[in-house]
Image (spheres, rainbow, N blue to C red):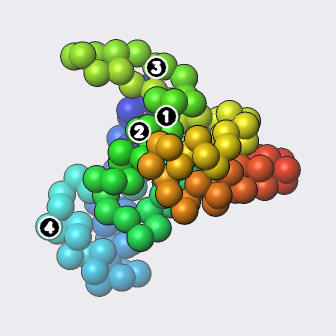
Amino acid sequence: AAVADLFHLKVPLLPLYDEWSKADAKCGLLAGGFPGLRVMRQDPVECLFSFICSSNNNIARITLMIQRISEQYGELLGAHGGHSFYKFPTLEALSKVSEDELRALGMGYRAKFIVRSAGLVLERGG
């Protein structure tokens, strides 16, 4: 059920492709070239911090950064095939992390933005 919700699997694609194509010709090309393309229903907190990690970065490194943050501060969801899977940490957990800890995980200059953003979002009602 969680995977179906994440990928909107119950939402029919063709009406979306038509709507997107009318709004932007490039979307029409994508829909035709990548059948099954869907918009994820990603957790807004994880989306925000993934975006912060994306600054001046590549997909492989962004994925590694999010994985490290999740492993260090997130909740273990389970394991399968020798791999452990973690939930992205809560705002509360991220707000307690220091810039130095994040730098040690490879966040670099983004560490201060992660710490500040977690505090700011919490301060404003999260």
Outermost bottom residue = 25
Q: Position of residue 55 (x, y in %)?
A: 46, 67
User: Mark 4 against mark 3, which lies toward the viewer?
Assistant: 3
Residue type of the residue flagged with mark 3: Leu
Mark 1 residue crowding within 10 angstroms, few (<14) / some (14–19) / many (20+)? some
User: SS for tag 2?
Assistant: helix
Residue type of the residue flagged with mark 4: Gly
Mark 2 residue crowding within 10 angstroms, few (<14) / some (14–19) / many (20+)? some
The residue beneath circle 4 is 33
Q: Position of residue 30 (x, y in %)?
A: 23, 70
The residue beneath circle 2 is 67
Q: Which of marks 4 and 1 is nearer the N terminus?
A: 4
Instruction: Give the residue drawn at x 44%, y 49%.
Output: 106
Q: Where is residue 7 in the image (x, y as percent from the top left)?
A: 38, 43
Residue type of the residue flagged with mark 2: Gln
The residue beneath circle 1 is 70
Q: In this view, does 83 lie to the left or right of 87?
A: left
Q: Earlier in the sequence, mark 2 or mark 4?
A: 4
Q: Earlier in the sequence, mark 3 or mark 2?
A: 2
User: Mark 1 against mark 3, which lies toward the viewer?
Assistant: 1
Instruction: Give the residue drawn at x 24%, y 16%.
Output: 82
Task: Tell me the distance, in whole angstroms, between the alpha carbons under discs 2 and 4.
Answer: 30 Å
The residue beneath circle 3 is 77
